[in-house]
Amino acid sequence: MTTEGLRHPRLSASGNRPAEHSMHRPRPERGLDPSYTTIIHTDNRSQPLVVRQAKVLGRLHAPRIDGGALICENARIICDGDLRVSTIIGYGTIIVQGETTCTELDFVGDIRCAGQVRCCGTARVAGMLQAEGGLVACTLDMIGVLSAPRLVANGSAIIDTLGDGLWAHRTLPCRDSHSMIRSIEAHQVEARRLHCDQINAKCIVLKDASDVRTVPLEAHLTVDEGSRIRFFERHDGHLLAAGRMIPTAIQPFHCQARACPVRR
């Protein structure tokens, strides 16, 4: 059931959310004209959905979705093909069997994509994000668990944890799981509870039992006592065991990714 041009009050996603994560709530729907918004309560479509703006309140199942802003209000969206929109905002569940492409991603909940997730701007996700084809974004601000074979960010990639509040229990039952990413390429990386084969970045901060196989030898590096780096990689590709390095040669620069001395 769809209704053209109706207003619907925006529900709050912050009911039981920890206060420390308030900065990651979806942004207000500024710049969206209600007169061009399609309200979708429940719709099981046999044809692709093409809209300028769509606000989903219940369940949407479509073979493909194209358009401008896709607003999810505690809804479940299933796309059998590609999802290509300008903006994805809101909270709920999104399942995509193809690829996901957007300019801005600001979402709370569960996103599962069988293909690649590509965001030309900033990707902000709180909850779970599974991108079987990899994740490409300008910058990433993730709170929760990320699973992807490859992560590429032009700027910073920050992967934080949800914590142990009531909101975390409801949103992410497997909140104790580590984010699993085979390779990360970014200007700066700050991560908690990360398992990764290779990180290529200028500034790297690892916390909360993170385990990374290789990092660049010249990277600005901060690692807490519970985390581990196995190898340092030189420019020629030669690996040096981290445990056998001379301490004075591997003395890390203590920095935070948000205030990295090499930040662009």
Image (cartoon, helix red, strand yellow):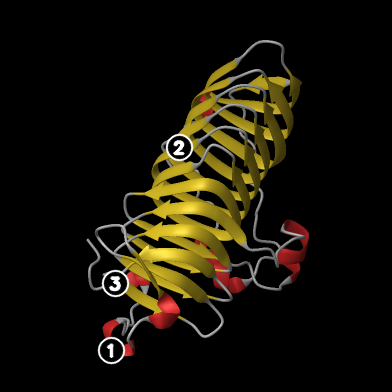
Q: Would you name the residue on which mark 3 appears?
A: 260
Question: SS class of the residue under badge 3?
Answer: loop
Instruction: State which tag comes first along the sequence, 1 or 3.
Output: 1
Q: Amino acid at mark 1?
A: Thr
| Mark 2 nearby-residue class (10 Å; few <14, some 14–19, many ≥20) | many
Q: Is residue 48 left or right of residue 135?
A: right
Q: Would you name the residue on which mark 1 appears?
A: 248
In what quadrant of the picture does the N terminus appear? top right
- Distance from disc 1 to disc 3, alpha carbons, whole Å, reads 21 Å
* Residue sitting at x 77%, y 60%: 173
Instruction: State which tag comes first along the sequence, 2 or 1.
Output: 2
Residue 120: x and y, percent? 37, 39
- Distance from disc 3 to disc 2, alpha carbons, whole Å, reads 25 Å
Residue 118 circle label: 2
Residue 247: x and y, percent? 33, 88
Question: SS class of the residue under badge 2?
Answer: strand
* Residue sitting at x 54%, y 43%: 89
Residue 43: x and y, percent? 74, 22
* Residue sitting at x 45%, y 37%: 118
Q: Amino acid at mark 3?
A: Cys
3 and 2 marks in contact (CB < 8 Å): no
Q: Residue 113 is drawn in which quadrant?
A: top right
Q: Choose between 177 and 247: the one closer to the eye.
A: 247
Q: Residue 204 is drawn in which quadrant?
A: bottom left
Residue 228: x and y, percent? 51, 75
Q: Amino acid at mark 2?
A: Arg
